[in-house]
Amino acid sequence: MILRIYRYKNGLEAFREFLIHNGMRVTPEREAILEEVFAEHEHFDVEGLIMRLRQKGKRSSRASVYRTLALLVESSLVQEVFYKDGHMHYEHIYGHEHHCHLRCLGCNKTIAILDEALADVIEGLGMEYNFEVISGRLEIFGFCPNCRDKNQ
Amino acid sequence: MILRIYRYKNGLEAFREFLIHNGMRVTPEREAILEEVFAEHEHFDVEGLIMRLRQKGKRSSRASVYRTLALLVESSLVQEVFYKDGHMHYEHIYGHEHHCHLRCLGCNKTIAILDEALADVIEGLGMEYNFEVISGRLEIFGFCPNCRDKNQ
DNA sequence: TTTGATATTGAGACTAAATATCATATAAGG
DNA sequence: CCTTATATGATATTTAGTCTCAATATCAAA
């Protein structure tokens, strides 16, 4: 459906290009949502995003937030991270595409890390399978030092 | 809550031990669901699992399927793979814990691969962060050779 | 084997995330 | 400016997943 991914200096510019090249319009709502998505660097969910938009006086409907988020995922500016507590959680990935999370099965704490070796593995697999790699994410599940001790 | 993960010769035995050691009961429903989960080696979703159970004359309620699946995820016999089309998709992982998927953003095809280097990265990160690693999964998003060409 | 405490099941009610609808508003090219 | 196709917002709708609770089954202990 929407096939091309564009790379520009920043997320806003990339998103504008993505919209225009796919015959869509640049609207204040879309720009406000994009801006807010990139304003924080933690995982977020739709409800939280709507709250933050409201607090800053940028109003957009729930429907528009969902619609714009779908576009951001499609353009690979944002990725779905995990589904938890009955809804999806996201993170923006423009500029730092390869993410890795350590998730503790005991306390549910998530640690985000960036690993060079992981990037190499991803690039290598891309080459091997002739894939044009856009982004990658590694989830490791296990027990953090704390919970491991409690377990014992 | 449920903390220990047990490793046994096969999934059924592991699940039995998991249940018993956590004060839960071994029931025909749970065993039938587990068996069906391990009967196929593709990704599956709840609806498909229920269909397959019905076709084989093993009846269990929708609620029990959801409940048992949650236990299987908790015991790391099964993992959530991705959320798509409005619901979660799963795969069993007992015996082959480290999985990697290449997912094409164009045609949605998913290729499952097993990579030694990935296993090393996961083990290495576990050591580094003092995590007791139970399982890991790597999702790589990009364009397969076909869709890359169409794009061009 | 029988009993009893307690965990599990199943049917369906319920919740809420996400989508669809459609009248109104707006972007953007002419 | 106009024009027209696209986007928005309010709300209805859908449906994945959870909850409830009476009936049933497990399993340890008598």
Image: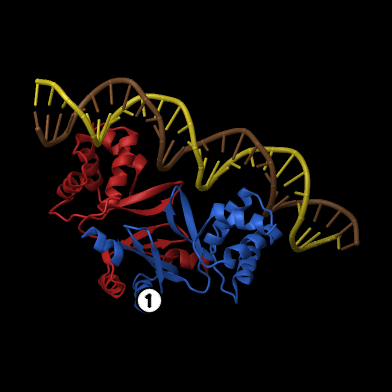
Chain colours: A red, B blue, C brown, D yellow
Mark 1 Cα within 10 Å, few/some/many (few <14, many 20+)?
A: few
Give the side of residue B32 with respect to residue A90, left or right: right
Q: Position of residue A30 (x, y in %)?
A: 23, 39
Give the side of residue B152 with respect to residue D25, left or right: left
* Rendered residue at 35%/58% (across/down): B107
**In the structure shown, which secondary structural element does the residue marked by tag 1 occupy?**
loop
* Rendered residue at 25%/45% (across/down): A37
* Rendered residue at 20%/38% (across/down): A25
* Rendered residue at 21%/42% (across/down): A23
Q: Position of residue A125 (x, y in %)?
A: 31, 73
Q: Quadrant of residue B30?
A: bottom right
Q: Position of residue A10 (x, y in %)?
A: 15, 52
Q: Would you say residue A77 is visible in this rendering? A: yes
Q: Position of residue B50 (x, y in %)?
A: 60, 54
Q: Nearer the viewer, residue D7 or C15?
A: D7
| Disc 1 chain ID | B
Q: Quadrant of residue A59?
A: top left
State whether residue B95 is above or below residue B68. below
Judging by the rendered image, the residue that carries numbered circle 1 is: B115
The mark tally for this picture is 1
Q: For the residue marked with disc 1, what is the amino acid?
A: Asp
State whether residue B149 is above or below residue A77. below
Give the side of residue B144 with respect to residue A109, left or right: left
